[in-house]
Amino acid sequence: PRPPGTNGGVSGLGLAASLAGGAFIGSAASLTLWFEQPCHGFAWELVVLGSFAGLGGSLIDSLLGATVQQSLYSEDQKKIVPELKQGENIKIISGIPILDNHQVNILSSFITTSICALAALYLYPTA
């Protein structure tokens, strides 16, 4: 186990929340489409795609956070800290300093969006 706040950490509750959040967004998209075009019916594939996007995006974010984002632990404060401070006893506990948290979030969002866009092209081919 890692200290709370470690970049890339996952929990069962967090993964379940990601899955549920994605299912909620997929359901909202499907309901909107259904109200707009009732002949289409409820698009369960959007609920499934949303669920995979939520869970997959969370896992991609965690993988990137654990590998290309450095986590620092302050021996003095006994917690994860976002940056090095002069004179503080800091220990690197994971990752390498390539990306910061904002960059990890943008990259994981881009990857997840790209995968979902390709899946949508497969699910809803155009003429």
Image (cartoon, rainbow, N blue to C red):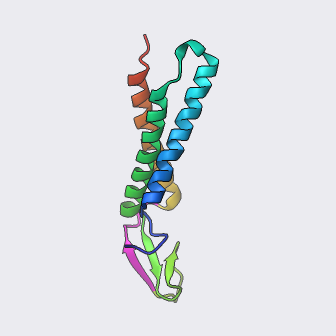
**Depth check: 62 or 18 in front?**
18
Where is residue 98 shown, x and y percent of the image?
A: 41, 62
Residue located farthest toward the right when viewing the structure as drawn: 35
Report x, y in % for residue 94. Answer: 37, 71
- The one nearer the camera, 1 or 97, is 1
User: Residue at the spot x=49%, y=69% of the render?
Assistant: 5
Q: At x 58% / y 22%, what residue is drawn?
A: 33
Q: Residue at x 63, y 18 (%)?
A: 36
Pick the residue in front: 32 or 60: 32
Q: Find residue 23 and report its horizontal and vertical position in percent.
A: 51, 40
Q: Residues in magenta? A: 90-99
Q: Quadrant of the N terminus?
A: bottom left
Q: Nearer the viewer, residue 61 or 23?
A: 23
Q: Position of residue 32 (x, y in %)?
A: 62, 26
- The quadrant where residue 67 appears: bottom left
Quadrant assignment for the C terminus: top left
Q: Residue at x 48, y 33 (%)?
A: 47
Q: How many marks on residues?
A: 0
Magenta includes 60?
no
User: Outermost residue, top direction?
Assistant: 127
Q: In the rendered view, tell whether residue 26 sits above or below residue 104.
A: above
